[in-house]
Image (cartoon, grey):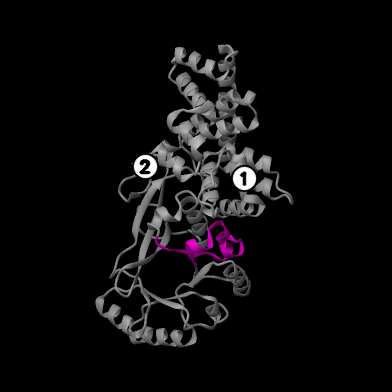
Amino acid sequence: MSELNMEGKKSQNVTQYIARQPIFNADRSVYAYELLYRESSDNVFPIGTSDGQATGRLFFNALMLMGLEKLTGFQPAFINLSTDAILDDFPRLLQPSSAVLEIVERTTSIPKVVTRVKQLKKEGYFFALDDYDGTEKWQDILPLMDFIKLEVEHPIIKTNMMIKKLKRSYPDAIIIVERIENYDDFKQLKKAGCDLFQGFFFAKPEVLSFGNVEPSKMAVLDLLSCTARPDIDFDAVQQRVGRDLGLTARILRLVNARSPNSQQTIKSISQAVIYLGEDAIRQFVRVLALSELGNDKPQELTKLALTRAKFIALMLEPGGKELSEQGYLVGLLSVLDAILDMELDRVTKEFSLGAELSSALLSFNGMQGISLRLVKAIEEEQWQDVRSFLTMIRPASHMDVVFKAMYSARAYADEVLTTLSSIAD
């Protein structure tokens, strides 16, 4: 089953929505997609949602979890940024070449934004000014823009004159006109020198939906506390991420998004956290705070994931910390297919888990895979299989080891979920 569905096919779990509207070139082929935050299948921007909240949720739920390439079919993506998002360096959560960052018309603190845009452009990021209205407010920003977006005005000659004026003043900028609703406007704008076109005449925004699991309030508060210190305790961050499936999925996706090496593979949560480093972790947590996530999660699936993860980690402890950590990640991700409505083989590819962990999840190979079979056999009360798998993992151990580990794992899962419930209340 595809991880990305057209609107109308809803996941049984938490469902995330996003709209995309194509941007066309003069021959009416797709040049890029603008991504728009949505809270439901209603194709409108949600009332009461600030620019900051919309940016945070778009980054955290869509871009970090699914990846731009899945949302745009490997076409460029235009993404609206709030003032806070620009100043908090959200763009650095993405590769510079992966998106065009739009400065919206409600942007404030212009001098600070100009300084930050100059810094980011030196690093290779591309910017667009959205809904340019000709006011003096934008004079310091305009020379920095790779794209300038206008809305159609009527009579159309007003827009045509603005296009020609911008072309003279900023010849290197690409001009996009939005809200084009008929062929005559398109023809006249094209003749005036407009480069790219967007509007209902070509295509309305298309709503996409995908399965989603959101991080808990407790996990968010814990991470905020960890990253508020001058020096981040990576062990503490890893432990908090490891207790939350929503955070784990996004941390792994973030590693993929930031890694220039397509061969980069992840074997544990601690490896992912250390790879990202302090700056990226702090930016990641800022996204969490701004987007105000923390809604109810699929409780039973979350409990199952935590129980499996802790049980496998305990069973593999004699093999060393690295093996135990790998086992924890295998257990945590073993239910992600059900939560994201995504086949497990796609999970392993999407999160670059590498051959060893992928083989454990898909074919139950290695000590991690056998441990996963062991915990599944316990869940199904297949005690003869339990004994066989235990012998393969820890030949000298008795069944008491299994019962103690499962008791500890269930207590661990209950403790995490109870804490989350008390925070939510």
The residue labelled by disc 2 is: 11
Q: Callout 1 environment at 10 Å: few (<14), some (14 to 19), or many (20+)?
A: many
Drawn side of residue 278 relative to residue 250, left or right: right
Drawn side of residue 320 relative to residue 136, left or right: right
Q: Position of residue 24 (x, y in %)?
A: 34, 70
Separation (CA) of disc 1 from disc 2: 29 Å
Q: Which amino acid, by three-letter code, is at mark 2?
A: Ser
The tag on residue 273 is: 1
Q: Position of residue 7 (x, y in %)?
A: 32, 51
Residue 424 to residue 257: above or below: above
Q: Is residue 417 visible?
A: no
Frontmost residue, 411 versus 171: 171
Quadrant containing the N terminus in the rendered view = top left
Q: Which amino acid, by three-letter code, is at mark 1?
A: Val
The residue tagged with tag 1: helix, strand or loop? helix
Q: Callout 2 environment at 10 Å: few (<14), some (14 to 19), or many (20+)?
A: some
- Earlier in the chain: of badge 1 and badge 2, it is 2
Specify the segment rendered in magenta.
75-101
Marks 1 and 2 in Cβ contact (< 8 Å): no
Residue 309 to residue 1: above or below: above
Q: Position of residue 313 (x, y in %)?
A: 59, 28
Q: Position of residue 345 (x, y in %)?
A: 41, 38
Residue 221 in magenta?
A: no
Drawn side of residue 37 relative to residue 239, left or right: left
Q: Residue at x 61, y 50 (%)?
A: 276
Residue 91 in magenta?
A: yes
Q: Residue furthest right?
A: 230
Q: In the image, which is nearer the foreground, mark 1 or mark 2? A: 1
Q: Is residue 270 visible?
A: yes
Q: Residue at x 70, y 44 (%)?
A: 233
